[in-house]
Image (cartoon, rainbow, N blue to C red):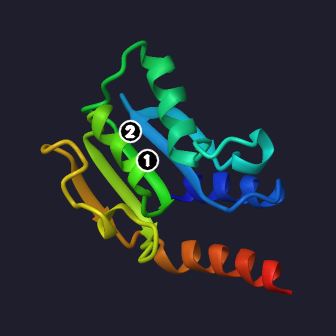
Amino acid sequence: MRLALDEARKALDEQEVPIGAVIVGEGRVIGRGHNLVETLADPTAHAEMQALTAATATLGGKYLPRCTLYVTVEPCIMCAGAIGWAQVGRVVWGADDPKKGYRCYSQAVFHPKTTVERGVLREECEALMGAFFATLRE
């Protein structure tokens, strides 16, 4: 999760919503990403999508059943759908997203064998998001 936080800080440096993601598989980081929505003017350029694209390119296949995705904020429904299609084996996030998180819509989006862990480094993840949005309000 610390590597995902590093990615989130890269997003912050680029004036993006500070969300970062890292995918670990085969004992190493195989994909990483941070929000690039503003930079690319692309509403699908979320951290998870960037990390999924990198991971599947690294492994040369579209399925990630023996991989873990670490992301600083609960995935939205779009990202959760992509995570489900990629059959990611485990998803770990820091901060819950009670407004846009996938659990607002459906808890059955991930692959049935995917395990979920929430709240890892929650305070750090929440603080990064809180600081970003406080700056926007100023």
Horizontal relation, residue 91 to residue 16: left or right: left
Q: Which residue lies furthest to the right in this view?
A: 138
Q: Which amino acid does label 1 sit on?
A: Cys
**Residue 53: percent from the left, percent from the top?**
52, 28
Along the viewing direction, whichever of 125 and 50 lies nearer the viewer = 50
Query: Which residue is label 1 attached to?
Result: 79
Q: Which amino acid does label 2 sit on?
A: Ala
**Residue 31: percent from the left, percent from the top?**
52, 33
Q: Is mark 2 on a helix, strand or loop?
A: helix
Residue occupying image coordinates x 65% and y 51%: 7
Horizontal relation, residue 42 to residue 48: left or right: right
**Residue 3: percent from the left, percent from the top?**
58, 52
Q: Are marks 2 and 1 in contact (CB under 8 Å)?
A: yes
Horizontal relation, residue 44 to residue 70: left or right: right
Q: Quadrant of residue 23?
A: top left
Q: Residues within 10 Å of mark 2 (few under 14, many from 20)?
A: some
Residue occupying image coordinates x 41% and y 77%: 98
Above or below, 7 relative to 135: above
The numbered disc on residue 82 is 2
Q: In which quarter of the image is residue 68?
A: top left
Above or below, 90 relative to 65: below
Above or below, 43 relative to 121: above
Above or below, 132 relative to 88: below
Residue occupying image coordinates x 73% and y 54%: 11
Q: Quadrant of residue 84?
A: top left
**Residue 70: percent from the left, percent from the top?**
44, 52
Q: Residue furthest top?
A: 60
Q: Distance between the residues labelled 2 and 1?
A: 5 Å
Residue occupying image coordinates x 53% and y 49%: 21
Q: Is mark 1 on a helix, strand or loop?
A: helix
